[in-house]
Image: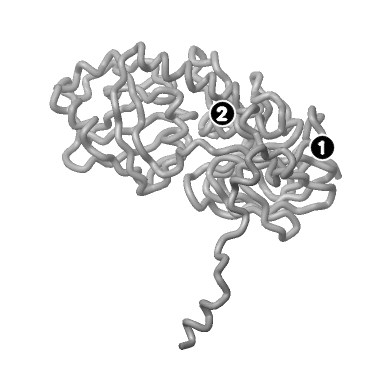
């Protein structure tokens, strides 16, 4: 046995990478990971290319066994994880020796957790990607009994590291830009879009996420008489009842609902990780502001490798060691007597 054996898997565990850009003209959307930032974090921890495939676990992980010595990184929505029964840290990389079992439970925050492996998951590529695209019938959820092939590890031995996770698991403000149909909505509707707080509905999947407004729906002045046009992840369609629907990784390639705006790519992970009931707000950016925000996020992700730190720091490497309070709760020793009396 080699690779990573699947002993148990949640119902929505799939192999994902950055997807298949460039196939819109053929009716195939990009697909790929819902939280692409989590792939970048896993790649930084393992010191390998971000394009390598990982496991995406929506809501629930599974039980896995190493067929050879492996390195793993756990990123995205925090989930309880153990190796042979021993708890291990999230947003960190660990050794998974041959025969060891990794168990990953449910998400405590957010939705999508990611298991990256040194060398990447090396299932056969389809149209240049290993990503399952369930809406298009490419691939399928991972199931018990499978053994996932693993590629050659580019940095064997590099484990015991962590990095700070970007906060995106509890809703918050999402930045959007206007699009060609934004002008179909009255100024009052656009003001409401920025003023109100929306709640993430229980209905949502890899195609899109439904958001519930506080009050009445956000109807367009042109109603639903819109010709079908190309749509992309991040577009916010307003459905017939006035409910916003944010298109995600496996969205259709064309749509006829009016689009009130588009979530910038840098903030799509916040939508992807919003669990049912999470509260989200929208804020319009100008084109130049949006381009600057995107450039800043790309630069931040390229620099993730420089933020990786050991899980256990060597005291000799801490320049301000004497300024750190290593022990708390020290008393004078007579407080027990005072409590008794």
Across and down, in percent, residue 146 comes to 74, 45
Q: Give the colour scheme shown.
A: one colour
Q: Residue at x 85, y 43 (%)?
A: 68
Quadrant hosting residue 256? top left
Q: Counting other residues with Cα less than 10 Å from the Cα at mark 1, is it few (<14), some (14-19), or many (20 or more)?
A: some
Q: Is residue 321 left or right of residue 240?
A: right
Q: Is residue 98 left or right of residue 238?
A: right
Q: Is residue 161 left or right of residue 282?
A: right
* Secondary structure category for the residue under label 2: loop
Instruction: Depth check: give the residue in front, 324 or 278.
Output: 324
Across and down, in percent, residue 141 comes to 61, 41
Q: Which residue is mark 1?
A: 157
Instruction: Depth check: give the residue in front, 186 or 93.
Output: 93
Across and down, in percent, residue 266 comes to 45, 25
* Secondary structure category for the residue under label 1: loop
Q: Residue at x 24, y 32 (%)?
A: 240
Q: Which residue is mark 2?
A: 32
Q: Is residue 251 left or right of residue 301?
A: left
Q: Residue at x 67, y 47 (%)?
A: 143
Marks 1/2: CA–CA distance: 28 Å
Q: How many marks?
A: 2
Vertical comparison of 257 with 311: above or below: above
N-terminal label among 1 and 2: 2
Vertical comparison of 152 with 69: above or below: above
Position of the N terminus, as image quadrant, is: top right
User: In the current view of this chain or complex, which residue is farthest to the bottom?
Assistant: 341
């Amino acid at each position: 046995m080699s690779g990573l054996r699947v002993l148990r898997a949640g119902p929505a565990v799939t192999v994902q990478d950055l997807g298949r850009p460039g196939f819109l003209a053929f009716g195939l959307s990009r697909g790929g990971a819902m939280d692409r930032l989590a792939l970048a974090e896993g790649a930084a921890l393992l010191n390998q290319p971000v394009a390598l495939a990982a496991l995406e676990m929506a809501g629930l992980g599974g039980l896995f066994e190493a067929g050879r010595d492996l390195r793993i990184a756990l990123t995205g929505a925090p989930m309880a994880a153990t190796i042979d029964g021993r708890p291990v840290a999230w947003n960190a990389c660990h050794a998974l020796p041959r025969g060891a079992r990794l168990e990953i439970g449910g998400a405590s925050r957010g939705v999508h957790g990611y298991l990256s492996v040194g060398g990447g998951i090396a299932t056969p590529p389809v149209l240049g990607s290993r990503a399952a695209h369930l809406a298009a019938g490419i691939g399928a959820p991972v199931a018990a009994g499978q053994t996932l092939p693993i590629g050659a590890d580019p940095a064997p031995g590099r484990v015991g590291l962590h990095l700070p996770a970007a906060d995106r698991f509890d809703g918050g403000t999402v930045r959007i830009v206007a699009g060609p149909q934004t002008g179909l909505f009255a100024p009052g509707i656009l003001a409401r879009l920025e003023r109100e707080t929306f709640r993430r509905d229980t209905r949502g999947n890899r195609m899109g996420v439904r958001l519930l407004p506080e009050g009445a729906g956000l109807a367009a002045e042109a109603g639903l008489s819109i010709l079908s046009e190309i749509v992309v992840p991040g577009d916010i369609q307003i459905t017939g009842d006035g409910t916003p629907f944010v298109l995600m990784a496996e969205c259709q390639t064309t749509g006829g609902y009016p689009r009130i705006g588009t979530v910038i790519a840098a903030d799509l992970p916040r939508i992807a990780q919003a669990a049912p009931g999470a509260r989200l707000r929208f804020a319009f950016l100008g084109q130049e502001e949006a381009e600057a925000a995107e450039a800043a996020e790309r630069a931040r992700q390229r620099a993730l490798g420089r933020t990786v730190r050991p899980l256990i720091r060597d005291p000799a490497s801490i320049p301000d060691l004497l300024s750190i309070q290593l022990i708390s709760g020290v008393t004078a020793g007579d407080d027990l007597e005072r409590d008794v009396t």
